[in-house]
Amino acid sequence: QKEVEQNSGPLSVPEGAIASLNCTYSDRGSQSFFWYRQYSGKSPELIMSIYSNGDKEDGRFTAQLNKASQYVSLLIRDSQPSDSATYLCAVDNAGGTSYGKLTFGQGTILTVHP
Amino acid sequence: SAVISQKPSRDICQRGTSLTIQCQVDSQVTMMFWYRQQPGQSLTLIATANQGSEATYESGFVIDKFPISRPNLTFSTLTVSNMSPEDSSIYLCSVGQQGIVFGSGTRLTVV
């Protein structure tokens, strides 16, 4: 059973702080990792993808991947109330011709309070 | 990234009936994926739809309950058959091209 686990929430941070979201996965063969943001009543929105060890930065978002530890994280700098949402970690186990077949974590609810 | 149009956006259905959900992609894609998101839960993959072949279903999902069509490289449908209240969920399609993106979802309520 391929599993993806996210740090239990909900997570509450003050505006301007750094929000840290964590995710571990069980399948060492996993090759692609994604973070989605989902607002209530909306579909998931891709905010970061990462494929190799290290950090990947995009604006206020930084994804970190450590394949040896089977760990992926998302940092949100200068958190804003508009960042309040559920964040979903997703792992693509299949790779190759089945790219897009994702296993999701249970999600972490983030609240950024003014 | 690809853009997916999904419809209907929501529906309320009687138990025992069926609903067909459509997804149209603005570019040709090899595979499309169908997910279910039950209330308060994360997403679970139902099946992978390839053009020209039968869909591949994940454990716990069967073709008789969730028949899928994939007539061409830009379109797919998922039918939720013989519905019960337990089928009340959000159903989403996705494609994996230059980033895995989702349609807007279909919120299904079975009464």
Image (tube, grey):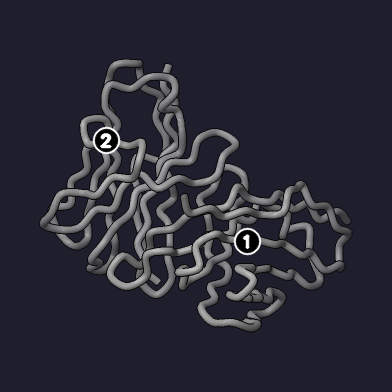
Task: Identify the image quadrant of the C terminus of chain B.
Answer: top left
Question: Which residue is found at the position 81% from the left and 56% from the top?
Answer: A112
Question: Which residue is found at the position 45% from the left and 28% from the top?
Answer: B88
Task: Please give the count of numbered marks on the rendered protein.
Answer: 2
- Left or right of residue A5: residue B73: left
Amino acid at pointer 2: Val
Q: Which residue is mark 2?
A: B62
Question: Residue B55: horizontal and vertical position, in percent?
Answer: 21, 49
- Residue B1's quadrant in the figure? bottom left
Question: Which residue is found at the position 46% from the left and 73% from the top?
Answer: A31
Q: Nearer the viewer, mark 2 or mark 1?
A: 1
Amino acid at pointer 1: Thr
Question: Residue A49: horizontal and vertical position, in percent?
Answer: 53, 73
Image vertical order of residue A43 relative to residue A97, above or below: above
Q: Which residue is mark 1?
A: A24
Who is closer to the viewer here, A95 or B48? A95
